[in-house]
Amino acid sequence: MTASLRPHHDRGLFRRYPGNPILSPDYFPEIVNAVFNPGATTYEGKTLLLLRVEYRTGLSSLIPVVSEDGVTGWEMGSFAPLHPEVDGFHEHWGVEDPRITKIDDVYYVVYVAYSAAGPIVMLATTKDFTKWERQGVLMPPADKDAALFPQTFAGRWALIHRPSAATEGVGAHVWLSFSPDLRHWGDSQVLLPARRGAWWDANKVGLGPPPLLTRAGWLICYHGVRLTASGSIYRLGLALLDRDDPSKVLARGDEWVFGPQEPYERGGDVADVVFPCGWVLRDDDDTLALYYGAADTVVCVAEASVAKLLDHLEMHPWRAESVERYLSNRPGVMQPWRPQPDGDR
Ligand code: BMA
């Protein structure tokens, strides 16, 4: 008997909003080059996006907009943009890719500043997106893709971030660092290493939106970058961290769960990029709206069920604690890369 092959529609875990893109450069009163990679949160019952707006200079600012339904009718209101302090060193070439964590009535916005020495991680706080307070540098260059957890662990803040190694060929991994005061960071450790070889998340990974607390632990969405003959493909994968000790990876999916597919994701300033910096849990406590930049040009949204994302991780796990067994029982299988005590050369 032969199985017949028929085309089928990949429904996937995330459902794109049919009206994507929800925001593009055309929406702006002034001429801008691109609107992408927004941070997301809720503000006074509305969905707030902190957009990365890239002007025709090439430099970006962060601009807040709100919407009642999180999809249509975006307004700039009387919010204040966070424009880069271009005369200074830290934000010399713009501010980019914000991740927003709300704690009590304060929004902690961790963003990438394009400093004169490369990308750094900075923090600004606000209560109303009208007055901003810069809190300074969290991580020196080269570092990006960072967000705070919405709680402390044994009295310490925790930051996920992605330093880039100066050494060629060792990969750029997702790290976790701790701080007693949001200023002094340490106890740094690799949290999610980039895999190697043919994997979709080989060599370069980075955090997407801030960690989301679920019944099973902290849900993580991260991007993996696959380098191909015609450029890079940015896709998304999932992982789960222990609720009380976020340095423990409980699960990490082997397969990517969302990738460039639609024309607005496959073409733009940078082709084949989906890049989320925020997600918002809707009122039903299960629907997660993922806000992402598509092709470094426009803003899109896709929805998923948190329960289904967790089911997916359960059914497609790469469990940290079973790595030894996984490797020894299945010789020949591409090995997930793990840090070696004596380096990885
Ligand atoms: C990353 C960041 C993002 C960008 C992505 C794809 O390194 O710089 O801002 O969306 O590359 O170009």
Image (cartoon, rainbow, N blue to C red):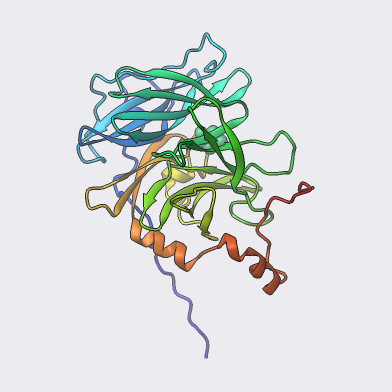
Residue drawn at point x = 29 percent, y = 19 percent: 130
Report whether residue 10 is seen.
Answer: no
Observer-nearest residue: 204 or 217?
217
> In the picture shown, does residue 46 fall above or below 203?
above
> In the picture shown, does residue 282 fall above or below 322?
above
Q: Residue furthest front?
A: 154
Q: Say left or right for 26 vs 141.
A: left
- For residue 135, which quarter of the picture? top left
Report whether residue 132 is seen.
Answer: yes
Q: Residue furthest bottom?
A: 1
- For residue 37, which quarter of the picture? top left
Residue 173: where, in percent of width, then height?
Answer: 61, 44
Observer-nearest residue: 121 or 255?
121
Q: Say left or right for 192 vs 61.
A: right
Residue 17: where, in percent of width, then height?
Answer: 31, 49
Q: Say left or right for 130 vs 269.
A: left
> In the picture shown, does residue 301 fall above or below 134?
below
Residue drawn at point x = 56 percent, y = 30 percent: 185
Residue drawn at point x = 46 percent, y = 16 percent: 84
> In the picture shown, does residue 39 fall above or below 314?
above
Q: Residue furthest top?
A: 87
Residue drawn at point x = 25 percent, y = 40 percent: 70
Residue 297: where, in percent of width, then height?
Answer: 44, 34
